[in-house]
Image (cartoon, rainbow, N blue to C red):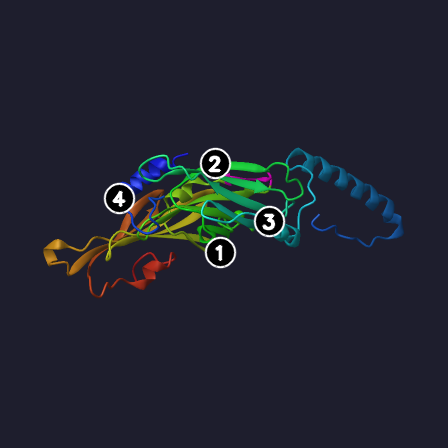
């Protein structure tokens, strides 16, 4: 788990952290109307399909009745929520239905930066004897209902979830676990660990990040899922104000993913006061020019 390493990198970049006082850190069966003479054939075909479906489901996801939101909501009300515990529901949208997720944070700090061990447990409320999954991670903030998000982070139609593990003056970083319906489990997506304040645009299938570097400088990033990998496709940076200009101007650059490499496609010095940049650079379909 690389969170501690990332936390140190963040610490080096952003210095002393304020804020949370933590360093944080069958298709539905189609019914065919068939002529009498075709019924025997149709029934035989249906039987064959059912046998294939049973074999397929048995090979990946265990048989599971799924759960409705109401039953899961009732289980949620019985969970502890305080500074070291959180609980919420995730509707996987598949055979497991709605799952209960609990988070427990060890109160004991591991180092001077306030890193603590935490555990995400995923519960099937039809079998509460033991969690469906236990997912350890490291955290540098307290538990809080505002520190979890349930979102379809990879735009596949199934809900995923994340938990805040680091929060600075503005940059904030989240651990993401994506639902894999075929495997019947959540899987950590490490790529999100480097994206501050991720937000999601399902319409354009983009993930956007924002990391403030100072009061006047910062970096916006845009990502897309390409061949299953969360891939940086644009980076727009307002650089630290130019000292030689008496902090009246600053450099703005835009880098795009071109032939597999991040390539600078725009560079301009702008007035710090007006911060003028062509707003079209905030549209990924714009690549410069008129
Ligand atoms: Ca998803």
Q: Which residue is under mark 2?
A: 136
Between disc 1 and disc 2, whose residue precedes? 2
Picture disc at residue 78: 3
Q: Which residue is under mark 1?
A: 202
Label 2, label 4: how far apart the Cα atoms are: 26 Å
Between disc 4 and disc 1, whose residue precedes? 4
Please tell me which residue is depicted at 82% across the width and 41% down the height of the picture: 44
Label 4, label 3: how far apart the Cα atoms are: 41 Å
Query: Is residue 201 shown left or right of residue 186?
Result: left
Foreground of the two, 270 or 183: 183
Image location of residue 62, percent across then percent down: 66, 37
Q: How packed is label 4: few (under 14 Cα within 10 Å), some, or many (20 or more)?
A: few
Which span is picked out in magenta? 182-187
Circle 4 SS class: helix
Circle 2 SS class: strand
- Kindly tell me whether mark 3's CB lies below 8 Å from ligand 1: no
Circle 3 SS class: loop
Tag in front: 1 or 2: 2
Q: Which residue is under mark 4?
A: 13
Picture disc at residue 174: none
């Amino acid at each position: 788990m690389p969170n501690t390493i990332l936390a140190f990198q963040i610490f080096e970049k952003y210095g002393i952290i304020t804020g949370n006082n933590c360093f944080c850190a069958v298709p539905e069966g189609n019914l065919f109307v068939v002529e009498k003479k075709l019924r025997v054939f149709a029934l035989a075909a249906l039987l064959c399909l059912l046998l294939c479906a049973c074999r397929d489901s048995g090979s990946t996801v265990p048989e599971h009745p799924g759960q409705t939101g109401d039953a899961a909501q009732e289980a949620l009300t019985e969970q502890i929520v305080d500074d070291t515990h959180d609980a919420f529901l995730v509707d996987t949208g598949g055979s497991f239905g709605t799952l209960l997720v609990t988070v427990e944070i060890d109160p004991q700090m591991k180092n001077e930066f306030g890193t603590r061990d935490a555990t995400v447990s995923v519960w099937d409320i039809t079998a509460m004897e033991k969690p469906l999954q236990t997912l350890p991670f490291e955290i540098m903030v307290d538990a809080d209902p505002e520190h979890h998000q349930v979102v379809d982070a990879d735009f596949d139609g199934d809900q995923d979830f994340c938990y805040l593990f680091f929060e600075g003056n503005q940059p904030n970083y989240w651990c993401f676990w994506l639902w894999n319906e075929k495997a019947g489990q959540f899987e950590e997506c490490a790529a999100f660990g480097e994206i501050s304040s991720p937000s999601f645009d399902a319409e354009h299938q983009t993930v956007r990040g924002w990391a403030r570097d100072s009061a006047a400088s910062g970096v916006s990033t845009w990502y897309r899922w390409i061949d299953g990998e969360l891939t940086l496709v644009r980076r727009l940076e307002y650089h630290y104000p130019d000292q030689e200009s008496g902090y009246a101007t600053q450099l703005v650059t835009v880098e795009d993913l071109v032939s597999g490499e991040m390539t600078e496609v725009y560079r301009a010095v702008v007035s710090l006061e007006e911060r003028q940049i062509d707003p079209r650079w905030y549209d990924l379909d714009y690549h410069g020019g008129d």
